[in-house]
Amino acid sequence: MSKPRLRIIPLGGVSEIGKNMMVMEYEDDIIVIDAGLMFPSEEMLGIDLVIPDISYLLERREKIKGIIITHGHEDHVGALPYLLPQLNVPVYSTKLTHGLISVKLKERKALTGAELKVISPGEQLILGKFKVELFPVCHSIPDSVGLIIYTPVGTVVHSGDFKLDYTPVDSKPTDLSRLAQLGAQGVLLLLSDSTYAELPGYTPSERLVGETLDHIMADASGRVIVTTFSSLVSRIQQVIDAAAKHQRRVFIVGRSMSDTTRMALELGYLNAPDGILARLDELHGLPRNKIVFVTTGSQGEPTSALVRMANRDHRQLHIMRGDTVIISATPIPGNESLINRTVDSLFKQGAQVLYDKVAPVHVHGHASQEELKLLLNLVKPKFFMPIHGEYRHLSFHAKLAESVGISKDNSFVLEDGDILELSPQMAKITDKVSAGNVYVDGLSVGDVGSIVLRNRRMLSRDGIVVVIIALNRQTGKLVGRPDIVSRGFVDTRESKDMLDESRDAVARILDRGGTHPADWGFISTKVRDTLNKFYYERTRRRPMILPFMVKV
Amino acid sequence: MSKPRLRIIPLGGVSEIGKNMMVMEYEDDIIVIDAGLMFPSEEMLGIDLVIPDISYLLERREKIKGIIITHGHEDHVGALPYLLPQLNVPVYSTKLTHGLISVKLKERKALTGAELKVISPGEQLILGKFKVELFPVCHSIPDSVGLIIYTPVGTVVHSGDFKLDYTPVDSKPTDLSRLAQLGAQGVLLLLSDSTYAELPGYTPSERLVGETLDHIMADASGRVIVTTFSSLVSRIQQVIDAAAKHQRRVFIVGRSMSDTTRMALELGYLNAPDGILARLDELHGLPRNKIVFVTTGSQGEPTSALVRMANRDHRQLHIMRGDTVIISATPIPGNESLINRTVDSLFKQGAQVLYDKVAPVHVHGHASQEELKLLLNLVKPKFFMPIHGEYRHLSFHAKLAESVGISKDNSFVLEDGDILELSPQMAKITDKVSAGNVYVDGLSVGDVGSIVLRNRRMLSRDGIVVVIIALNRQTGKLVGRPDIVSRGFVDTRESKDMLDESRDAVARILDRGGTHPADWGFISTKVRDTLNKFYYERTRRRPMILPFMVKV
């Protein structure tokens, strides 16, 4: 009988960026690492968000010992409100992450019954045959961790999302010595963050941003407005520090920024000297060079405070000539044009705008190539699996591993659903389970599939034409002229004649042969073909055509 | 009586990037510089392309003495096939640009009757009271020029799209000495390219790319596949040169790449040593390290040869393990995800892929900040107007001008349609003419307006529900149950019950009061409101609702 093996199955995070979720299975025990969401790409029309397909887990619900969350970003926790009610297992995380998860579950009314447990880096957690230890890593949110998982076949290290910053804002650098120690003892498998595996060199320290903020607060003769992600607590800390140094007061603007800031202050992840933070009603009378605003809007979100200010659409605040706006964030792919439009509006209002292209006002939270090599060198894993990235990121990461001595045969670039099986001596991809995108659209999870999306795409391109055909109940003959209504196809006034002619074209083909109601399938295909051809010839467009029969 | 003034009116190119078109008017003379198109941004659903609104020109048709084209890129020539038949004036350009315009007009059946004239840099052109002289500039297509326009109020310099490259591939650097000479004589106004005004430093020379290509061709043990814009003739020259050096043969793949290459060879803009270019039927038997392909597909265009090869969908060619693919182009904003998907597919097929993020395989064609300052320093204009860019680019460029001594009051950041009036002593923005986007969708130019686009956006998000209500012709009472058809809203099988209930909800409100056909406006609003509310409560979606009445 063959010995049991460890199975590693990514249900998300290695085919696209986002919706990270990793399954580790050994005999009757399963642990899950992260449960993230992904924001829809542009071809997923109308979709609110995307979560992993967990049918593999649902079929093995009783095996699951817990979900461990590496940090509080949406792409690692965002699917919990949707998946936790189905799985109903304990969730382990550090303190700040726990706070963020609670807020999120409460918002989605999924908090009741959830078993959320706080653990600290260094503590060990027994989950069936797995023993899990958290180690601190630097990332763009405090309290981020990687995992050391002791399994019956060997030790597995999961980096979480990480970078190496020897001078981080919260003074908690990635714990390299613990990793070196593990490396010396022998690590079976390393799973490591590939998000920035394309980038040569090192990711700069947060300190660089701190220095830039300091200079700006010192030099700006007017107000300073900083926009960033509300989860980027260390950036908010840097703004507070720089403001304090230059006797500026800090106004936190907008609901999500206020909520996170309050929570981070309460839990001790944010420190503000007395009298620095101010309420909006204290704004009046304060000199402009004593004012700093912190707000969301770094992605050009139309409802954010910054975008409202840029469009003179905010009830209390507006941009003044001489304001300096700092966009302290990277554009999430797909948001570029919204952000560009916001920057343009800010310039038009007379603000000076600083963003990553023109000034060092942001550093990202993931390791670049040299840091990835350092981690590989310290951990010295027997096997390597790049995670958190699209195929090209994972490929680059595998190449980096090769350059530091991990042979091609021991590197495994998986896609979502692939099973990597490991014994102490060997590893191989053995099989594939169902994995992929589950769409959340409004209240429903998973009902929007390929047909609905294909229809939305078709509608978005050339609109729709509805044809209403009245047939005599007895004779099956056409009654009156077919009616046509269109939306999103042509300007209905300008194209009135063309639409009228198309009604006649339908009438002609219906008048021809005798029509039996039973032939409706045949008729509607005929109507569709005729109109497709007619409209394409006249307009070179292909609206969706929806024939509808009424018996009168 | 006040003296006549020079009027400068951008009809495109200073509110968005693309569709460049500049009007210069003095008394009864108008000249137009460039006539470009813009590719639609993602919210312009279904639109094929965007051209400038030329109603200002159409009202003054008899004044127009000619259109001068600075170079052959789509954002400078692409609107000609649509606008030239309406304007019917001579078009002046250099030889290669002329070739590209002819091809384009022919494709669109607009060549007949077009008056296309070739002029050379240095030549002078008299157009009414304007005297125009072309000077060579470096850009990412050969035969690019800037313009010196002598007007009754002073000299105007228009940079075209340019960069400074002291070692260009075609050995025709931007003519700085001519500009310095002009600067010494006195220039009234400089119009200068702002596309990369955000970027500090200098744009690297094309030579950098040449060196990279040389190394790759030398080192690659397999085939090399280079993808770039077909208009980037100098890049194709570099590929041919590097291939020749390393005894590789060059296969030009795809129609548009073949067409441009042939034209450029004929006109002498591309030089290939004998025996370098090969036909696909010569491929067989050639060792892999003797092969180079040049193809389009750098933007991830689904129908391009490269993307077909990446997806194993090309009839003759497919990617082999060991191929090196070079993407020698910058992503056009909006194309990033298509390109990323192509890179991922290439990696999956076993190719090594090099693109601008990971290797110096492309340099762009526009001046960076230091080059812009140099131009300002040489030309020393009295007045300055940044062109070719969005508001933030123009703002940065105006700031650069300020830093080299052009006062804020003498810099003019315009938006499309603004009129800048100049006398020898002064300049000011005096008025605004109608300008903006004209959408081309299929055969029609300009019929798609805001209503059609709004409808397409609505349809793309949550689809459509058509409600068919049969009313008795005499009594106005509901006959039968209302019918409902939806597309792109929900999965119609899974949501059958919900859709059924919604039919009942409509029936209930129609059964209530007595219904007169004359009340149709009232009824349809009522139906729409009821269903909006019903669907939003059940699904949190807002499909378009289209009630339709049939009298029976």
Image (cartoon, coloured by chain):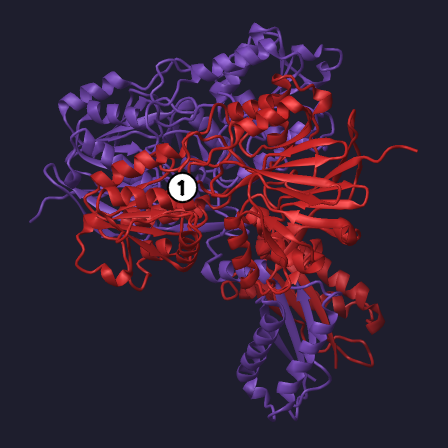
Chain colours: A purple, B red
Residue A270 drawn above or below residue B475: above
The residue located at (58%, 23%) in the rendering is: B378
- Measuring from the top left, give residue B167's x and y in whole percent: 40, 31
Chain for numbered disc 1? A
Name the residue at the right extreme. Answer: B1
Q: Label 1 sits on what residue type? A: Lys
Q: Is residue B197 visible?
A: yes
Name the foreground residue: B391 vs A394. B391
Q: Is residue A214 above or below residue A52?
A: above
Q: Is residue B493 left or right of residue B377?
A: left
Residue A420 is left or right of residue A394, and the answer is left
Secondary element under disc 1, as helix, strand or loop, is loop
Q: Which image quadrant for residue B123?
A: top right
- Label 1 crowd bin: few (<14), some (14–19), many (20+), radius 10 Å: many
Q: Is residue B432 left or right of residue A254?
A: right
Q: Quadrant of the C terminus of chain B?
A: bottom right
Residue B101 x, y percent position in the rendering: 55, 54
Picture quarter containing residue B4? top right
How far across and down, in percent of the image, does residue B405 sit?
Answer: 64, 17
According to the picture, the residue beneath numbered tag 1 turns out to be A19
In the figure, is residue B450 to the left or right of B301?
right
Indicate the quadrant containing the N terminus of chain B: top left, top right, bottom left or bottom right. Answer: top right
Residue B469 visible in the current orientation = no
Q: Residue at x 20, y 60 (%)?
A: B284
Q: Position of residue B73 (x, y in %)?
A: 53, 47
Q: Residue furthest front?
A: B123
B444 or A343: nearer the viewer: B444
Between B16 and A440, the one lying in front of the other is B16
